[in-house]
Amino acid sequence: MRPVTGAHPDTGVDLQPCQHLAMLIVGVLTLVVAAVAVLCLGRSLRREPPVAPAQPLDFDAAVRAAEAVIAAEAADPEVRPESRSRLLSHGSQTGRVVLLLHGYTLAPDQYDGLAEEFFDRGYNVWVPRAPQHGTVDRLAHHRVQAGALTTYAAQALAVAEGLGDEVGVVGISGGAVLAAWLAQVPGTVVRHLLLLSPFFGPDPRQAPAFAVRPLILLYGRRVLPDRVTSRGYSLAAVTQYLSIARTLPKSPRRTGLRTAAVAISPLDGVVDLAAAVRVPRRIADANAIPLQVCTLPEALGVGHNTLNLGADGPELRRLYVALYEGERGSSPITRA
């Protein structure tokens, strides 16, 4: 039997040389289709996703809204108990509120440690579950849609606004895209922004920048059948986040943002690290504030999930809060 060579990047299944040729042909055809799709549909990428109107809430109404979400999830057998939304409240309106938006494929429990850190510092904290996430069906997140994500983010911010005076947002990965989007929506009152491993584009080693637009059109609009990567990421789903990132204004709006920070890891093989800094820097510049950039040392062994902190968790969580609040030089881990 002839030895097989090469490996499929997602499945790890070995491929014979003839299959490589077939893949090359398919790739060329895909690019042709993509070029046509870009010409026909490209303009639609700049449309902002629809947002459900959010009425201002007072503290009691905000708590009732959050508790209604949590109760509905508790009554839903499809939602895993450990993945339900979380409200950490001091029982009355506080001076500071933080909204925590979790990452793609994960759930609010991703923020358990950081939520407690903010709460212990006097914040009211709202950690909502994203659509199609945290369910018994572990593949449900494949079906998430950009419009549902932006509606979820807008409604979550409306609850957070009712919990206190000064509101900020922390987001990780896909949640960071939503956080940046909220910070740029006209009329919002986001005053602090912390982005962890923001997914404004894929690692160029996984997909070069020129391929992102065709990916959004072909997979995000279901022109091609969905494909799942070795990390369990659905291309149809991740391109929903990328399409939201594409709606961020090229010339960011001045919205009253007071602090902005980003934390990344050089070991992150998921996101485009240059875009992870470039996009929030534009937002910070538009608001005439500095952008704090924290690059975690490789020795920490932290990859894409910059909340998976291990033994360094307590120190890094304190660092994240300091970055969120705009403190400088707060930790030797910080790298500008």
Image (cartoon, rainbow, N blue to C red):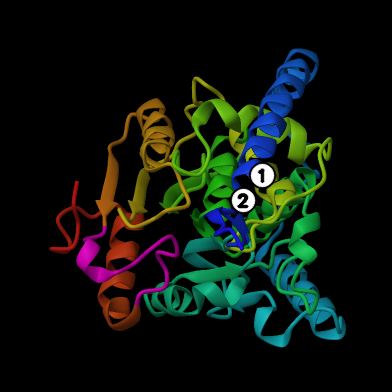
Query: Observer-nearest residue: 141 or 55?
Result: 141
Q: Quadrant of the N terminus?
A: bottom right
Q: Residue at x 57, y 61 (%)?
A: 103
Q: Residues within 10 Å of mark 1 (few under 14, many from 20)?
A: few
Question: Residue 242 falls in which quadrant of the image?
Answer: top right
The Cα atoms of the two marked residues, 2 and 1, are separated by 5 Å
Question: Residue 8 falls in which quadrant of the image?
Answer: bottom right
What's under tag 1, amino acid-wise?
Answer: Gln
Q: Residue at x 63, y 56 (%)?
A: 229
Q: What kind of element bears circle 1? A: helix
Residue 306 vertical placement versus 173 (above, below): below
> Label 2: which residue?
16
Q: Main secondary structure of the magenta part?
A: loop
Q: What kind of element bears circle 2? A: loop
> Label 1: which residue?
19
**Image: magenta residue range:** 296-309
Q: Which numbered dot is residue 58? A: none
Q: Is residue 246 left or right of residue 308?
A: right
Contact? badges 2 and 1 (CB < 8 Å): yes
Q: Is residue 303 magenta?
A: yes
Query: Observer-nearest residue: 35 or 118?
Result: 35
Q: Residue furthest front?
A: 1
